[in-house]
Image: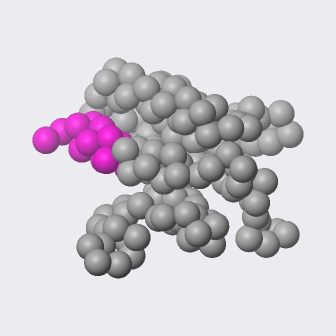
């Protein structure tokens, strides 16, 4: 299997799992947060969607130069809006992966903040870190939010206590 095929397969698995988590968040809990320093549930969910959205930016372009004060973020106010934004970003990621090759993902990608370069690394490595690993990290965080809200937590790599038979 090629490197791009491996990344595409991983993207499909992780986005499918992530969607099962996001679809569990009821709109009435969007403003909830476990601590005053924590994201609200909606902001964390939006950040997860933003991470999925980076797939196209990384794979199609050679750099991202952001101004944190104006960078557009997903801000859904309902579960329907959240899932629609997620599905849109996943589809854009699929298109970017389909248009990529092993040689294109080996090429360099630069991350800049207001013109100042923070790093340059191969696209494949940045895709894995900024999209896949970042989503996995925040999905774990999000599963704790669901647990604290007493919402059944879906499994990521196996069943949770909410999914085991007899529990």
Residue visible at 76% across and 35% down?
71
Magenta stretch?
1-14
Q: Main secondary structure of the magenta part?
A: helix
Whether the magenta-drawn stretch holds residue 125 is answered as: no
> Is residue 118 rendered to the left or right of residue 123?
right
> Is residue 81 rendered to the left or right of residue 92?
right
Whether the magenta-drawn stretch holds residue 11 is answered as: yes
Q: Is 43 placed above or below 107 here?
A: below
Pick the front one: 76 or 152: 152
Q: Is 35 placed above or below 63 here?
A: below
**Residue 115 makes an appearance in the image:** no
**In the rendering, at what x and y percent does residue 83 appear?**
55, 36
**Residue 158 makes an appearance in the image:** yes
- Image quarter of the C terminus: bottom left
**In the rendering, at what x and y percent does residue 18 appear?**
45, 50
Which quadrant would residue 19 be assigned to in this image?
top left
Q: Is 111 placed above or below 25 here?
A: above
Residue placed furthest toward the left: 1
> Is residue 2 rendered to the left or right of residue 92?
left
Q: How many marks?
A: 0
**In the rendering, at what x and y percent does residue 66 appear?**
74, 36
Pick the front one: 60 or 93: 93
Which quadrant would residue 120 be assigned to in this image?
top right
Q: How is the image coloured?
A: one colour
């Amino acid at each position: 299997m090629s490197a791009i095929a491996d990344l595409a397969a991983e993207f499909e698995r992780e986005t499918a799992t992530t969607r099962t988590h996001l679809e569990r968040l009821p709109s009435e809990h969007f403003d909830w947060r476990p601590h005053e320093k924590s994201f609200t549930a909606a902001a964390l969910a939006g950040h997860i969607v933003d991470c999925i959205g980076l797939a196209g930016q990384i794979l199609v372009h050679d750099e991202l130069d952001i101004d944190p004060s104006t960078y557009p973020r997903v801000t859904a106010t309902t579960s329907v809006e959240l899932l629609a934004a997620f599905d849109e970003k996943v589809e854009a990621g699929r298109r970017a992966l389909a248009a990529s090759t092993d040689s294109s993902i080996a090429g360099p990608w630069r991350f800049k903040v207001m013109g100042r370069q923070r790093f340059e690394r191969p696209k494949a490595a940045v895709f894995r870190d900024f999209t896949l690993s970042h989503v996995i990290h925040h999905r774990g965080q999000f599963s704790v939010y669901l647990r604290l809200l007493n919402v059944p937590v879906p499994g990521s790599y196996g069943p949770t206590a909410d999914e085991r038979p007899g529990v």
